[in-house]
Image (cartoon, rainbow, N blue to C red):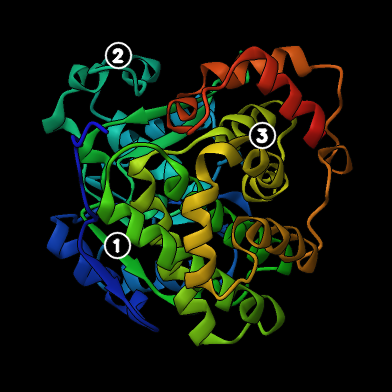
Amino acid sequence: MNLVGNWNYPTPIRFGNGRIGEIADACKSAGITKPLLVTDRGLADLPITQNTLDLLEAAGLGRAMFSEVDPNPNELNLEAGVQVYKDGGHDGVIAFGGGSGLDLGKMVAFMAGQTRPVWDYEDIGDWWTRADSDAIAPIIAVPTTAGTGSEVGRASVITDSVTHVKKIIFHPKVMPSIVICDPELTVGMPKFFTAGTGLDAFAHCVEAFSSPHYHPMSQGIAIEGMRLVKEYLPRAYDKPDDLEARAHMMSAAAMGATAFQKGLGAIHALSHPIGAVYNTHHGTTNAVCMPAVLQMNAPVIAERFDYAAGYLGISGGFDGFCKFVDEFNDSFEIPRKLSEMGVGTDRIDELTVMALNDPSTGGNPVEMTTENTKALFEAII
């Protein structure tokens, strides 16, 4: 094994119920005097968003919001957001919401001061060095779901509206300056999103734990993240106002995104093109993909999941873990096949090419080929 790695851990996080009340102080600490709150359309008019704008307005920080953000945000959303940012004379962004709001908000802060197209900063080689680091505005991230973990990430996923390809845009300074994790903000999530986002966090942990790369710290975070999801997602799903469960799920989301710097894999390589082409919910898509990917990777990962199963209190080692995943998905009414989510078999060849070009393929423990990737799509659709 090549015991070499580039490791990075999260930014300052203010964690706890009611800590959204510190949003004005967080702006002050980040040097933001005129923030633009970026969120998605579904959150724009909800009380948690309006209350946050009230707090900003009361502190003399204005009341500015951009919410024209699609579930899978694209460069058109980004261009519109950057224009609003520039026209308003803003000096920082509050990225507020689930993965779409967080990712788009981070990109508005990133792109507002750049001169090249966003695709020139894709996570390929050292393309991030093309950016003017000094022109990146400060970011405060406020997650309102417990899943993507984008609040502790140095990248965003943006969909190309022309090619329908999801691309990862990376820069170290895209990491938010401050994160406010307030579990109370997640209480109003519908059951579908509680399940889908929670299973996204679970997928991050599973793939990080499966990755062949060397990162023992992420390995430890991944297995504990799996445990938190296993124990607390059912409680958050059944009792939306269970703040203890919501808090542990919010932790698991940040842990999953921290752990997957070790690598993602075939689950995400499949779900990224599916989401881009069919606009499916990312976490739910991950959950549908997971059983087939576990089986493909079995020759390499079975032994380490024998250990994980013991830690998680699951009998039967790797096979028991796979059985648990099926039953866990069923308990949240996750479809067994993507056809139930509107995905057809007519574009498998196209999806296969897109999956093999996805950067997540490099973290899969079994090399992804045209043959095994196409077989995966056939199995999950």
Instruction: Tell me the residue at 78%/69% (across/down).
Output: 331
Please name the amino acid that badge 3 sits on: Gly
Specify few, some or many for label 1: CA neighbours under 10 Å numbering under 14, 14-19, or 20 or more.
many
Please name the amino acid that badge 1 sits on: Val
Q: CA distance from mark 1 to mark 3?
A: 27 Å
Quarter of the image for residue 94 reads: bottom left
Please name the amino acid that badge 2 sits on: Arg
Instruction: Tell me the residue at 20%/16% (across/down).
Output: 130
Q: CA distance from mark 2 to mark 3?
A: 26 Å
Instruction: Tell me the residue at 31%/29% (across/down).
Output: 111
The residue that mark 2 highlights is 116
Q: Secondary structure at mark 1?
A: strand
- Label of residue 179 in the image: 1
The residue that mark 3 highlights is 275
Instruction: Tell me the residue at 45%/61% (across/down).
Output: 253
Q: Give the percent coordinates (x, y) of residue 294.
A: 63, 44
Mark 1 or mark 3: name the one nearer the start of the chain: 1
Q: Secondary structure at mark 3?
A: helix
Q: Secondary structure at mark 2?
A: loop
Position of 88 compared to 281: left or right? left
Q: Is residue 191 above or below residue 148?
A: below
Label 2 with label 1: CB-CB less than 8 Å: no
Q: Give the percent coordinates (x, y) of residue 89.
A: 26, 41
Specify few, some or many for label 2: CA neighbours under 10 Å numbering under 14, 14-19, or 20 or more.
few
Residue 39 visible at all: no
Q: Is residue 31 above or below residue 6?
A: below
Q: Nearer the viewer, residue 160 or 26?
A: 160
Q: Give the percent coordinates (x, y) of residue 236.
A: 62, 78
Q: Is residue 298 above or below residue 283?
A: above
